[in-house]
Image (cartoon, rainbow, N blue to C red):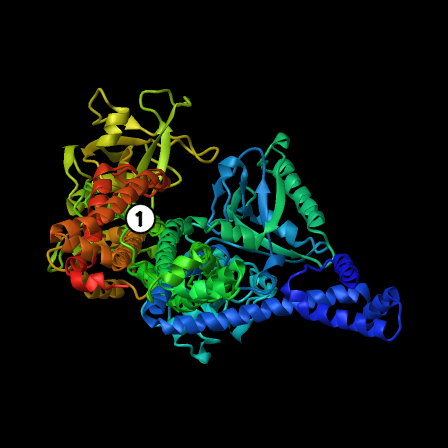
């Protein structure tokens, strides 16, 4: 009766009737028996017992606490036991931990770089409170100028962006009711820095006076720019970036108050920013900041028109006042924007376009603008994820083989009463211990590997990336999560299979735990074989990915760009930054070209507005030849202004017509002014231009690009006249097809000099610097490299991706072959008695080798077939990365399959050789 009532009581309490509650049940029963012995009725005895234990709720909580305590004690006990078992097998533990460390470490390394780009927090206080002004409309704005430095996303053609005009910023800045701070800045501007040793080009930015207060940035030395510095009558001052201060000025405190020259204008350094801040985006880092009002003195070709409503070149950020909803501030600035854009002196939109301003999170928008840098890392993440799966399968195979040696131990524990669930938890705990040890070592490998990857990324780069791996909480959480998940994945199947055995057969087995029966059936494909086949398939996918990327890199490297890139020195110069005017620039370039051409070791010298294969491009549109000038039949063409002897220096063959003469440059200079002449500018076109626009007639002498005047009242430009045709040459990118291109004489502006040399091009750099310094101490050279180095930089992404994919493919292949080796070694050991009997009855060595290799060939074939099938689908995602090869390229598939077969069969050599050396007499006594 008492036991029935107690069972009812525990049912009310919701307590499971298992061993975890025995202790509390025992004490409760003793309390009830004690109360009955004292003369209480049974019902009162139970009630008083509950009161003594704190009532039903308290008793229920006590049961839960006991249950939690028992689980913790069981886990600690399993952990201690698992640690002892792992210590008893140091070889197995070392191999398993290192295998997992490689897989987990590779994943953590790639994730740390993705984290540094995708999840980068702005280096400012309260980054989430910073808002970015984005315009939205149903139509692109009718602006005369729209400049964006890539700080944020957006697409002007789709009616969105973040570049805005100065008059709008001034009106918003006056809205003190809703904003505590509003600031604006321009895209990056190259500045010529003098007064601190040889002239150099630095990355500068024009900012409004409230820029640093809006961001919450403080000065490390001196002070930062303030509102008063952004007035037209204010003294010319500048602020240095901390890292640039260390690099260019040696971190000297005396820099505050030092006078420097920017584009030939004297400026005073008033401060240095704190170390943590360099820029709001990774793509645009800066060396120096100057007030927004300094643009008139420092920006070439700046005019008062750049401050009008139809010139959009500012990014605006701000913070709302405490207590002011973002929606209220957004409505206020949208009203200002709409009124100015529709009802202003120069309407930019129509009313039906519904222009408005969206206040977006600056942290999110700036991060989204960097997504393009993540694509190679995503490919790498796929590769290292597959490597981790191979590592898991490898360790799972090791654990399966190890569990076979522990059959007797598990059987004894089950015979003594251990439950199957407790044994599974014990084996899972051992797997988690291995995973956590592998994760800990992998974390150190990850940081080392990520730094090595950054070295590869930065190698040969003129401007190293502005990010780096950091051991933040996301990386730690990712590594911990991967470690735990890995432990569960590779430990689950062996844990479930371990206790699933026959007690009698296991206890009859020898000490080794292997069956001694000759007639034991052998499955053609065991579960360990399935794991090996999976490893082979995953290795195939990684190897195919690596093979396609390597072939892409090879195709790009051996691609004929249409010109001779060997022995060419490149360097850029912008005389405008040193105060030169247009007529002076043309004379300077002509003089420099003559001096460079006369240098010993230089065979030819020229210059152009942009270097070939630098990633930069200039294009224009014009009326299709032989159509009326007012026709809307517009066609596009690339354009490249060049200097004399350009085609000779770059060795681009002339197909017909003639090269430019000095008279052609004079005509181009006359047509570049506000009052163009009557004579058309000579132009040389490539063969793609002729094929597209003059397919059925001789283009020489033809005229095109009769453009309309850009300003009302300005005379119409005379256009271009074709005087020559040259062979096709790549312009901005090796991947991009050659488009119709015309070359015209370069006048004014910046230039890139190309020097073809008979010696090592880099040996000419000191001589070139000497000539430039004699011309002017403010003329700075920048972007100095050889043409081949410039091409290599353009292929840096493909090179790094191919190198890393090859490394991970090699790692996947080694891990898969180690798994195959381990399985075959285990099979040979398990079947030692069978092999001995076969040899005793007359089997030859080749029969034994065939027995071992037969299983290996089956596993390799199955794995290769599955891997190739999956790879055909997976690698289609790489279409944007490939060039000159497609995802199902048969050469790559066959080569990868052959490589896998050769290496895998080589891994089978040792187990097969060991099988042929089994002594029949020893094998017959084997247990």
Give me the residue at 15% from left, 36% from top: 654
Q: Is residue 922 left or right of residue 395?
A: left
x and y, in percent, of residue 683 in the image? 25, 35
x and y, in percent, of residue 914 in the image? 18, 60
Give me the residue at 26% from left, 65% from top: 773
Q: Is residue 859 left or right of residue 602?
A: right
Q: Note whether residue 875 is visible.
A: yes
Numbered circles on residues, count: 1
Q: Nearer the viewer, residue 119 or 138?
A: 119
Q: At numbered mark 1, what does the secondary structure look like: helix, strand or loop?
A: loop
Q: Nearer the viewer, residue 156 or 167?
A: 156
x and y, in percent, of residue 397 in the image? 35, 56
Give me the residue at 29% from left, 40% from top: 865
Quadrant for residue 243, please give it: bottom left
Q: Is residue 838 left or right of residue 382?
A: left
Quadrant for residue 777, please give it: bottom left
Q: Nearer the viewer, residue 614 or 239?
A: 614
Classify the position of the C terminus by image quarter. bottom left
Q: Nearer the viewer, residue 404 or 446?
A: 404
Q: Note whether residue 475 is visible.
A: no
Whether residue 5 is situated above or below residue 539 in the rendered picture: below
Using a 10 Å C-alpha cutoff, classify the residue at mark 1 as few (fewer than 14 neighbours), some (14 to 19) or many (20 or more).
few
Per the image, the residue denoted by label 1 is: 521
Classify the position of the N terminus by image quarter. bottom right
x and y, in percent, of residue 98 in the image? 35, 66
Give me the residue at 70% from left, 58% from top: 321
């Amino acid at each position: 009766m008492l036991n029935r009532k107690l069972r009812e009581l525990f049912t009310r309490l919701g307590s499971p009737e298992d061993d975890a509650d025995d202790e509390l049940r025992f004490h409760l029963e003793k309390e009830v028996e004690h109360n009955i012995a004292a003369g209480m009725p049974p019902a009162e005895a139970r009630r008083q017992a509950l009161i003594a234990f704190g009532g039903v709720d308290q008793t229920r909580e006590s049961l839960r606490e006991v249950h939690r305590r028992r689980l913790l004690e069981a886990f600690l006990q399993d952990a201690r036991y698992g640690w002892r078992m792992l210590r008893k097998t140091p070889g197995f533990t070392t191999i398993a931990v290192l295998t997992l460390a490689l897989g987990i470490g590779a994943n953590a390394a790639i994730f740390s770089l993705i984290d540094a780009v995708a999840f980068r927090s702005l280096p400012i206080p309260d980054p989430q409170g910073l808002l970015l002004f984005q315009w939205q409309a149903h139509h692109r704005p009718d602006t005369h100028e729209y400049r964006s430095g890539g700080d944020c996303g957006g697409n002007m053609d789709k009616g969105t962006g973040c570049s805005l005009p100065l008059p709008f910023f001034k009106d918003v800045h006056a809205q003190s009711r809703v904003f505590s701070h509003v600031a604006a800045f321009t895209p990056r501007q190259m500045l010529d820095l003098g007064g601190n040793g040889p002239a150099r080009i630095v990355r500068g930015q024009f900012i409004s006076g409230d820029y640093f207060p809006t961001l919450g940035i403080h000065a490390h030395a001196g002070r930062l720019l303030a509102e008063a510095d952004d007035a037209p009558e204010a003294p010319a001052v500048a602020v240095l970036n901390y890292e640039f201060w260390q690099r260019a000025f040696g971190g000297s405190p005396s820099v505050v108050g030092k006078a420097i020259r920017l584009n030939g204008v004297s400026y005073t350094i008033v401060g240095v920013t704190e170390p943590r801040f360099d820029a709001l985006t990774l793509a645009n880092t800066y060396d120096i900041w100057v007030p927004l009002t300094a643009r008139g003195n420092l920006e070439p070709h700046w005019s008062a028109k750049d401050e009008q409503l139809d010139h959009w070149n500012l990014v605006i950020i701000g913070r709302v006042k405490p207590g002011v909803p973002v929606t209220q501030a957004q409505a206020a600035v949208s009203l200002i924007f709409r009124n100015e854009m529709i009802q202003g002196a120069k309407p930019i939109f129509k009313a039906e376009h519904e222009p408005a301003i969206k206040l977006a999170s600056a942290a999110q928008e700036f991060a989204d603008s960097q997504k393009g840098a993540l694509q190679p890392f995503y490919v790498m993440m796929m590769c290292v994820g597959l490597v981790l799966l191979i590592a898991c399968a490898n360790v799972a195979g090791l654990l399966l083989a190890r569990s076979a040696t522990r059959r007797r131990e598990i059987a004894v524990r089950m015979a003594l009463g251990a439950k199957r669930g407790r044994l599974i938890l014990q084996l899972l705990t051992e797997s988690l211990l291995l995973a956590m040890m592998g994760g800990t070592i992998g974390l150190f490998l990850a940081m080392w590997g990520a730094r090595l990857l950054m070295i590869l990324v930065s190698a040969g780069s003129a401007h190293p990336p502005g990010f780096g791996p950091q051991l933040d909480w996301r990386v730690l959480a990712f590594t911990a999560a991967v470690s735990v998940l890995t432990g569960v994945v590779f430990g689950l199947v062996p844990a479930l299979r371990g206790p699933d055995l026959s007690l009698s057969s296991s206890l009859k087995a020898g000490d080794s735990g292997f069956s001694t029966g000759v007639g034991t059936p052998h499955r053609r494909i065991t579960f360990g074989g399935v794991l090996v086949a999976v490893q082979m398939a995953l290795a195939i996918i990684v190897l195919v990915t690596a093979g396609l990327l390597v072939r892409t890199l090879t195709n790009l490297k051996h691609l004929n760009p249409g010109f001779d890139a060997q022995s060419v020195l490149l360097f850029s110069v912008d005389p405008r930054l040193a105060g030169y005017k247009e007529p002076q620039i043309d004379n300077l370039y002509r003089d420099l070209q003559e001096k460079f051409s006369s240098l010993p070791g230089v065979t030819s010298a020229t210059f152009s507005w942009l270097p070939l294969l630098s990633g930069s491009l200039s294009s224009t549109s014009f009326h299709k030849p032989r159509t009326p000038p007012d026709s809307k039949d517009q066609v596009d063409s690339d354009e490249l202004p060049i200097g004399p002897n350009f085609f000779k220096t770059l060795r681009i063959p002339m197909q017909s017509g003639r090269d430019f003469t000095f008279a052609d440059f004079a005509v181009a200079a006359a047509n570049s002014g506000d009052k163009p002449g009557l004579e058309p500018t000579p132009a040389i076109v490539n063969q793609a231009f002729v094929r597209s626009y003059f397919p059925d007639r001789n283009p020489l002498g033809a005229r095109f690009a009769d453009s309309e005047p850009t300003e009302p009242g300005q005379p119409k430009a005379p256009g271009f006249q074709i005087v020559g045709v040259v062979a096709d040459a790549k312009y901005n990118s090796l991947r991009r097809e050659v488009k119709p291109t015309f070359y015209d004489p370069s006048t004014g502006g910046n230039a890139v000099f190309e020097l073809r040399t008979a010696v090592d091009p880099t040996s000419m750099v000191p001589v070139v610097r000497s000539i430039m310094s004699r011309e002017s101490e403010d003329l700075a050279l920048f972007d100095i490299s050889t043409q081949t180095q410039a091409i290599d930089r353009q292929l840096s992404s493909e090179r790094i991706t191919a190198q890393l994919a090859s490394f991970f493919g090699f790692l996947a292949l080694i891990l898969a072959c180690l798994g195959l080796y381990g399985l075959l070694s285990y099979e040979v050991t398990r079947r030692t008695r069978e092999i001995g009997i076969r040899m005793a009855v007359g089997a030859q060595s080749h029969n034994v080798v065939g027995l071992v290799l037969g299983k290996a060939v089956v596993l390799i074939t199955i794995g290769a077939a599955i891997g190739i099938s999956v790879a055909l689908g997976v690698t289609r995602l790489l279409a944007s990365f490939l060039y000159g090869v497609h995802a199902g390229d048969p050469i790559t598939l066959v080569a990868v399959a052959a490589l896998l077969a050769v290496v895998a069969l080589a891994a089978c050599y040792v187990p097969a050789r060991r099988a042929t050396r089994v002594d029949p007499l020893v094998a017959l006594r084997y247990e």
